[in-house]
Image (spheres, rainbow, N blue to C red):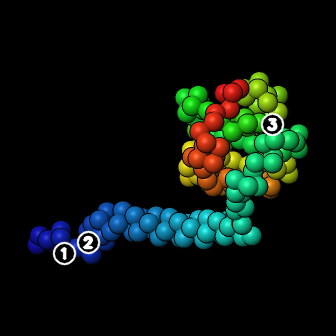
Amino acid sequence: MLVNASRSPVWRHALLRRVAAPSLQLLARHQSSKANDEQALKAARKLNDKLQENWKGSILTYEQLKPKTLSPSNDAYLIDVREPNEVMQGSIPSSVNLPLSVLANSLNLNAEAFRSQHGFDKPGKSQEIVFYCRSGKRSASASDIARRNGYENIINYEGSWLDWVSREGGRKNPSA
């Protein structure tokens, strides 16, 4: 008597292993990565909360900035985060240029490499740093980047170049 192979218990068990095993492996893999994704997401949220904790982005007005430009201090930096071609239009007196496009990488350079690349000393983590740009948007981003890189005394000149020029009557920095 011939036995139908598809009805044989041994054959059915072997067939199930071949078909079901890969599906179970995918399910197990999906569940394990899903758990890791949830853990990673939880860790990322916790880190973000810590970064946002006590983050009070200080803002500077023209009236507060003007005296700083008249008598600059070695303990404070006024950093223009515009690109060099924008700085050619003029800059605020006593400012140095450090474009936003290179800011994050530059803040991670050692002091010697920073000075070599930018022509001025790298700011210390606790030194006052005032950022400005054209209208205040990039300087806010620069403030955030510096904060995330461990700088503590960060101030954003929110009005930035447009505010400065409107209040100074269009005068440009003669050294720019």
Mark 2 Cα within 10 Å, few/some/many (few <14, many 20+)?
A: few
Q: Disc 2 marks which amino acid?
A: Arg
User: Which residue is under mark 3?
Assistant: 122
Q: Disc 3 marks which amino acid?
A: Lys
In the picture, residue 14 is in which quadrant?
bottom left
Residue name at image x 79 percent, y 30 percent: 120
Residue 121: image location, x then y, percent? 82, 33
Q: Seen in the image, is 77 located left or right of residue 73? A: left
User: Which residue is under mark 1?
Assistant: 7
Contact between marks 3 and 1 (CB within 8 A): the answer is no
Q: Seen in the image, is 117 located left or right of residue 102? A: right
Q: Seen in the image, is 112 located left or right of residue 58? A: right
Q: Depth check: 29 or 127 in front? A: 127
Q: Disc 1 marks which amino acid?
A: Arg
Residue 139: image location, x then y, percent? 62, 49
User: Which residue is under mark 2?
Assistant: 12
Contact between marks 2 and 1 (CB within 8 A): the answer is yes
